[in-house]
């Protein structure tokens, strides 16, 4: 039952985010567009590249979808409304997200084309750049909650949301999440301007539909993680808990999808430089500050 | 519809066909810059643009399809998934592409009508019996047989090697052009592992080619494949060495005297440098290699498959694997791949064929050619002045007015005419209006390239309105233009992205915004009294990088707005009746991309001789040095910032 509710919520969320993304790209708000586009994608031929690595080519998009779904499984939408409340939920989320990298490399390598391959390798090159900034802020969040359970993490924010408690961690986490979901301006693996679609370039038809859906699920899972870790999850006055979750997740996902389009695509070298030289020290500082606050001020 | 999917249009498929008709994804040939310069607003018609033909459903051909792009366009068409269609706006002869599914005039109204037409066609014919196979001649291949040990032995038939008696192995090679029509039949001969049952899908097996079609590489490599280059091939097979002991060499196959392993043939370094060779893995099969051109790659199906026909079973030693590979600047030996970008690449000017040799994601070498540069200034021995002006204006679809002005000025000088000063300044204003539109067009392209969709939309929309506006209309558009430029310069991270990228050593031949952004004061307008009367002063920048070029162009937009305001009126360049005078004329005009110079001879009122120099060649020459050693994205930004018009590349 819970699984069904979560899946339906993901589907609805993916649809809304797709509308928003289409607006950000084409400048028009067309509510029916994602449905039409999806139907059209299903109607198009799914072309197999000439000499593909068949296993990687087929498995890449599906693995990405699985990784997104697994990550979503530990996001609590309301008390009791979570697919599985693992004691190590935050760690599990990390583990699930690690497969995004694998899936993208497979999808880039599989079709045996230069654009896809370079896109996949670019993502591999960025691994430390985003992965450290995902895991280190989570560490600080877990320190405050004294638990890795996502439900406990939400409950730990009853007095004060983490966005106020550790704003630095919030900013780093959102930026890293955008990198992980290759959202503009960090859309280097697909980079329409210099890789003509990159890892997506050789996928058509149903396979492309799966790849795009998987990315939507991943964006929602990451937005859900942001809400869980920093925005108090389902907590909020007047409205029922699931409504708060849905609202917050949609707003965060919407901002992640659209805000980055106001700046040009970040250069690969610059992204790595900022992430390694600035991001990681800041994330360490965040852990230190949160540690000190947690010891001194009991909130 | 020729590009339909096979199957009856029933039930659910009807619904899907309607969705397909509404969700058109266009791939534009030669490029969006040409579409914008022709005053077309594709996005405004609800046509979404695809960055690769793989994601497109309509091949939109804008204006006459240049002969040099026909093959590339046919490759792009072959890459599109079915159902696919062709929409041609005054495209002329499309061969080797199939007939267009919808045609129209090269105007916004023509585009809208053709799209409506196309949507009906797709809704009714996305699935149907009209489906026909299509394969681009540029992609056709045939199977030939060769000896694994003696590459010079090539046969059309399976059999044994006359030299060593080994069984010949099949490989795929580009079809010779003369046989292009019937080169496909052997495709299903068990050579390609992935032959699909569906004949319609079979045409798509050409895998990972990209918009470019890169026929050049194919032709080159066909020679190697055919064994035409006997000297090189013989050299290559004359040496054998041990995979473990490179110092052991022999001119005979045999065993290593140190370890007893079988000796393997040494391959000619030059023949393979940058292409990767047979025993290497994935990256040698970059998109262009899939054109089947690289002889000996046949049956390379699975990356992991060790036992592949056509490849000697090797001991996989790193020494052996990397021996012939070029080393990067950091000394790391790595496989280099040649990747075609263009001629229809979304981040580059349409028609520019760029080939980058990639060392990982860094550019090791770059070369550019134009697919649209076939320029014949004088189609007839003696051309009438009016026809000559039209021909020169048609030279570049990106800046026809500047070339029209150039032709007029040269003709007037030859005929000894002098236009009235207000006419001259109105004509100068027309050139300036085009400069604004051209720079905005470039800004829109920069928006596409760097993911700034708002910039693409607004700059493209603005240049569409500006392109044909009169002086008053331009005055009305001025606030919006300056607002756009202000917003652009306030864009966060923009200068960070462009700073220091694409610097160039001072080139004497260089002119235009690229030269002025580096501090040069070369501007053909500064010697022109007409511009002097309008208060023109050369605008220069500092830095000479991509950021300086952006700033230079936005500065020139503002400057040209001022010049038009002072000129007060706009008139298209034209010459008065010249009569039957004879004489020589020479003129120079500052086009949006630099100074273009024309010399012509009038004999009895007809143009009998003409010679032109354009700014493009000097810009193309910058590409190699600018891209070398840069990360791919940076190299593309740098090349994009040059604003090259491949149309003006004269022979």
Image (cartoon, coloured by chain):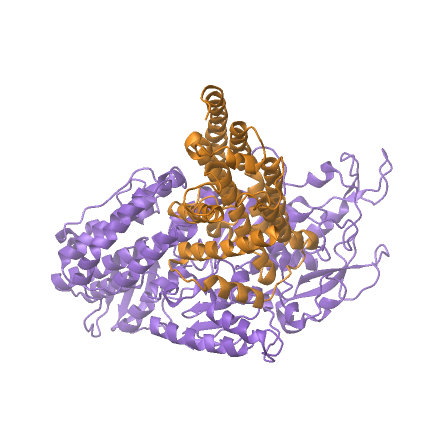
Q: Quadrant of the C terminus of chain A?
A: top left
Colour-to-chain, purple:
B
- Residue B136's image quarter? bottom right
Counting from the top left corner in percent of width and height, residue B420 is at 12, 64
Counting from the top left corner in percent of width and height, residue B264 is at 79, 44
Judged left or right of residue B407, residue A147 is right
Q: Is residue B531 visible?
A: yes
Looking at the image, the residue that sits furthest to the top is A296
Residue at screen point 81% across, 64% down: B158
Judged left or right of residue B259, residue A296 is left
Q: Is residue B271 visible?
A: no
Colour that chain A carries in the picture: orange
For the residue pair B333 and A220, the one nearer the viewer reads as A220
For the residue pair B387 and B42, the one nearer the viewer reads as B42
Counting from the top left corner in percent of width and height, residue B297 is at 70, 55
Q: Is residue B212 above or below residue B415?
A: above
Residue at screen point 21% across, 55% down: B478
């Amino acid at each position: 039952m819970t699984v069904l509710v979560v899946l339906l919520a993901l589907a609805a969320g993916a649809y809304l985010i797709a509308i928003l993304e289409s607006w950000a790209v084409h400048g028009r708000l067309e509510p029916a567009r994602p449905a039409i586009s999806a139907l059209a994608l299903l109607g198009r031929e799914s072309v197999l590249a000439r000499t593909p690595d068949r296993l990687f080519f087929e498995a890449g998009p599906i693995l990405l979808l699985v990784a997104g779904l697994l990550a979503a499984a530990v996001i609590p939408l309301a008390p009791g409304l979570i697919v599985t409340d693992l004691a190590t939920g935050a760690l599990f989320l990390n583990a699930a997200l690690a497969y995004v990298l694998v899936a993208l490399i497979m999808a880039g390598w599989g079709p045996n084309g230069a654009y896809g391959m370079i896109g996949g390798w670019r993502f591999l090159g960025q691994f430390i750049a985003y992965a450290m900034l995902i895991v280190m802020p989570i560490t600080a969040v877990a320190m405050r909650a004294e638990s890795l359970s996502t439900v406990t993490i939400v409950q730990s924010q009853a007095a004060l949301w983490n966005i106020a408690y550790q704003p630095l961690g919030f900013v780093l986490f959102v930026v890293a999440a955008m990198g992980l979901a290759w959202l503009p301006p960090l859309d280097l693996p697909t980079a329409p301007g210099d890789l003509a679609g990159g890892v997506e370039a050789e996928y058509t038809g149903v396979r492309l539909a799966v790849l795009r859906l998987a990315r939507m699920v991943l964006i929602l899972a990451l937005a859900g993680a942001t809400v869980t870790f920093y925005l108090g999850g389902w907590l909020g006055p007047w409205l029922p808990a699931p409504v708060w979750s849905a609202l917050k997740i949609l707003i965060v996902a919407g901002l992640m999808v659209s805000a980055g389009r106001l700046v040009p695509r970040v250069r690969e070298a610059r992204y790595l430089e900022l992430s390694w030289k600035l991001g990681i020290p800041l994330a360490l500082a965040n852990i230190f500050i949160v540690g000190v606050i947690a010891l001194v001020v009991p909130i | 519809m020729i590009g339909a999917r096979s199957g009856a249009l029933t039930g659910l498929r009807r619904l899907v066909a309607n969705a397909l008709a509404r969700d058109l994804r266009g791939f534009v040939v030669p490029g969006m810059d040409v579409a914008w310069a022709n005053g077309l607003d594709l996005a405004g018609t609800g046509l979404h643009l695809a960055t690769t033909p793989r994601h497109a459903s309509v091949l939109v051909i804008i204006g006459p399809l240049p002969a040099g792009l026909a093959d590339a366009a046919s490759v792009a068409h072959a890459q599109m998934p079915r159902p696919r269609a062709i929409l041609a706006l005054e495209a002329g002869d499309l061969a080797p592409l199939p007939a267009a599914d919808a045609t129209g005039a090269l105007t916004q109204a023509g585009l809208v009508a053709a799209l409506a037409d196309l949507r009906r066609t797709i809704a009714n014919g996305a699935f149907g019996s009209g489906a026909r196979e299509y394969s681009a001649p540029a992609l056709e291949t045939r199977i030939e047989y060769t000896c694994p040990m003696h590459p010079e032995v090539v046969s059309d038939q399976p059999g044994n090697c006359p030299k060593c008696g080994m069984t010949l192995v099949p490989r795929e090679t580009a079809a010779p052009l003369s046989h292009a029509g019937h080169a496909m039949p052997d495709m299903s001969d068990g050579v390609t592992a992935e032959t699909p049952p569906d004949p319609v899908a079979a045409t798509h097996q050409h895998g990972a080619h990209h918009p470019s079609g890169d026929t050049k590489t194919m032709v080159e490599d066909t020679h190697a494949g055919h064994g035409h280059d006997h000297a090189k091939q013989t050299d290559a097979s004359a040496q054998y060495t041990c995979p473990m002991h490179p110092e052991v060499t022999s001119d005979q196959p045999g065993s290593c005297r140190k370890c007893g392993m079988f000796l393997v043939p040494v391959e000619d370094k030059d023949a393979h440098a940058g292409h990767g060779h047979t025993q290497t893995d994935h990256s040698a099969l970059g998109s262009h290699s899939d054109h089947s051109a690289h002889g000996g790659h046949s049956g390379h199906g699975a990356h992991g498959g060790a036992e592949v026909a056509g490849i000697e079973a090797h001991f996989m030693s790193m020494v052996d694997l990397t021996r012939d590979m070029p080393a990067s600047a950091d000394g790391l030996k790595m496989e280099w791949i040649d990747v075609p970008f263009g001629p229809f690449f979304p981040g580059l000017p349409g028609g520019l064929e760029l080939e980058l040799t990639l060392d990982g994601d860094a550019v090791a070498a770059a070369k550019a050619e134009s697919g649209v540069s076939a320029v014949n200034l004088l189609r007839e021995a003696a051309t009438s002045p009016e026809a000559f002006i039209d021909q020169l204006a048609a030279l570049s679809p990106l800046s026809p007015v500047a070339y029209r002005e150039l032709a007029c000025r040269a003709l007037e000088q030859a005929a000894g005419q002098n236009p009235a000063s207000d006419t001259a300044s109105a004509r100068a204003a027309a050139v300036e209006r085009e400069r604004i539109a051209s720079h905005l067009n470039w800004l829109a392209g920069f928006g596409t390239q760097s993911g700034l969709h708002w910039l693409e939309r607004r700059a493209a929309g603005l240049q569409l309105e500006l392109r044909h506006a009169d002086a008053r209309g331009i005055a009305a558009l001025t606030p919006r233009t300056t607002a756009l430029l202000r917003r652009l310069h306030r864009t966060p991270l923009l200068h960070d992205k462009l700073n220091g990228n694409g610097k160039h050593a001072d080139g004497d031949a260089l002119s235009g915004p690229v030269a002025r952004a580096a501090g040069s004061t070369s501007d053909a307008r500064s010697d022109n009294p007409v511009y002097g009367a309008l208060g023109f002063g050369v605008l220069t920048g500092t830095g000479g990088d991509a950021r300086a070029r952006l700033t230079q162009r936005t500065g020139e937009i503002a400057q040209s707005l001022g010049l038009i305001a002072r000129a007060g009126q706009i008139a298209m360049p034209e010459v008065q009746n010249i009569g039957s005078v004879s004489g020589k004329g020479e003129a120079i005009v500052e086009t949006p991309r630099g100074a273009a110079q024309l010399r012509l001879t009038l004999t009895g009122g007809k143009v009998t001789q003409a010679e032109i120099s354009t700014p493009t060649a000097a810009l193309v020459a910058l590409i190699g040095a600018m891209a070398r050693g840069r990360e791919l994205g940076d190299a593309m930004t740098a090349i994009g910032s040059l604003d090259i018009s491949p149309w003006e590349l004269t022979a």
